Amino acid sequence: MTFCLFRIQSFPKLWKSNSYLPLGPRHSYLCLFMADSCGIRKQPRWFSLKTISSQNTKATNLVANSRYLRKYNGNDNQVPSDSLHFFSAGAAKKRSQMNSQSKDHDLPPVRNTIQLPTQPLNSEEWDKLKADFKGRSFESWIISQMAHDRSPVDVAKSLLAWVAAKNNGIVAYDLLVKYLHLCVIHKQTSEVIDVYEIMKARYKILDSGGYTLLIRGLIQSDRWKEAFLLLEDLKKVMTPSRKNYDDCIQGALLHQDVNTAWNLYQELLGHNIIPMLETLKAFFDFGKDIKDDNYSNKLLDILLYLRNNQLYPGESFAHSIKTWFESGQCSGCGKTIESIQLSPEDYEFLKGRIMRDVIDGGDQYRKTTPQELKRFENFVKSCPPFDIVIDGLNVAKMFPKARESKLLLNVVSQLAKQNLRLLVLGRKHMLRKSSQWRKDEMEEVQKQARCFFADNISKDDPFLLYATLHSGNHCKFITNDLMRDHKACLPDANTQRLFFKWQQGHQLAIINGFPGSKLTFQHILSYDTVVQTTGDSWHIPYDEDLVERYSYEVPTKWLCLHRKT
């Protein structure tokens, strides 16, 4: 897959040293070859981003066109799909398959027949399990198996409690590290912090695995800055890995510490370490809502780095680049359109008003209690920021023909595969076994997401608003509820407009989430649908004749006006 950026005159440094290219200044372009993981008909896919006007300094009026380019020979016949160029992606694997020969394989090692526990055990039960074990190091073996199988953290914790009881409160370092690995997998930040405190008190220096796990676990917590201290400790004994830098950079961006993220990136390059593509993608994902020339120039430097080091972004990364280039641009004139994202000042103002007028001063106590709301507030504060908050009951009822627990599990599972931190809000009746709520499916939901189940009479909306706003401006929420009642609780038109703008930029609506199908969402607009001007131009959204628009909807047509000079 290739991105071609045509007539972008604000990128001179991207081709300053490329005089050998037969291109004029009005036809300059940058090509990014992208690995296409779809494997559709083995045809290269092209995205071309081209501009009509050169007014904007970033990438004006970028129009994305996607098409498949077919390969033909001299007789206009399509090249056979198995005729791959020697250096084409997938060619080596195909040659390997063609040349593979059957070989004798060693017999697999005999596995221990002990079944891993699924519930915490007491001392007597652990003693019995160890007596049945046929091997030398029961504790090390079973904690390794738990980490491999992603066993529940509370089961592993009962193992460590049993070990500590037998050894005067001491747990061996290797057991702590493997338990820490399990906590990081399940994103149990409170347990990560407990292990961190133990290690900090007991050991002056750790091995690279211990540092790596602690950095990865702490960076997602409210003690994220201590991960940078661990990175400094690691530097005293060795050069950190690119994964260590990736964890710290992504954590810094998650917590809006942009300067630290860029400083760590420059430090990584200074060590001649090639950054992970996920690291570079994180900068583009963060930058799509930032209108800052300095930040944009740094992203252009990343593109140049990809070129100079012959690095190829994957499909997800390429789409992040595409989204950044297209964000907030008028397709008619290339002028920047006002972003749908609130400024930090507006966000904090809106957050305070919603907390005061909707959550604390609204009518939610008619259907919940102050005690339950306080319990939820403490729960949210104990968790790291969420990426997506899900109205579990609302999502589960989107497709009436599907079993509700199965539908909710399908949505949660597909989001969890994207390594997103999820919160599912529900009600206690969802945990009771019934025809619509299977216990095993709800247990799987709780493994893949943090969950909070309120009383059956409680309303979900105040909890959803609180968790989303508390997690930060990056957090999105999923529900089909339009929240018009909560908007009406806000005292003035300006605050209501800010709420609607925030809602448009953060509410995800599921188009297709039926079990067995790919989860798809309605596209979130990157720009604000209001009348806008830049002095010499006007952009005016307008209603089409014969198209009925409700009060919670916005026009889809724009009038683009320019003053002639």
Image: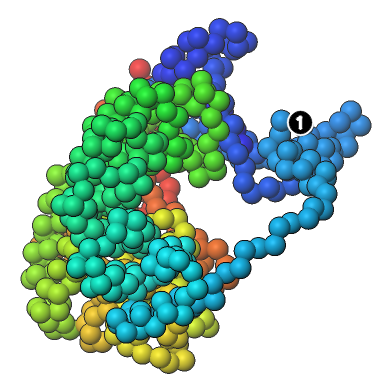
- State whether residue 91 is above or below residue 467: above
Nearer to us in this view, 149 or 219:
149
Q: Quadrant of residue 298?
A: top left
Q: Is residue 240 visible?
A: yes
Q: Report the number of discs.
A: 1
Q: Is residue 42 left or right of residue 137?
A: right
Nearer to us in this view, 459 or 418:
418
- State whether residue 395 is above or below residue 353: below
- State whether residue 383 is above or below residue 263: below
Image location of residue 528, percent across then percent down: 31, 46
The residue type indicated by label 1 comes to Phe
Q: Residue at x 40, y 73 (%)?
A: 445
Image location of residue 472, percent across then percent down: 23, 53
Q: Is residue 324 visible?
A: no
Image location of residue 124, percent across then percent down: 32, 84
Nearer to us in this view, 339 or 98:
98
Image location of residue 220, percent across then percent down: 27, 52
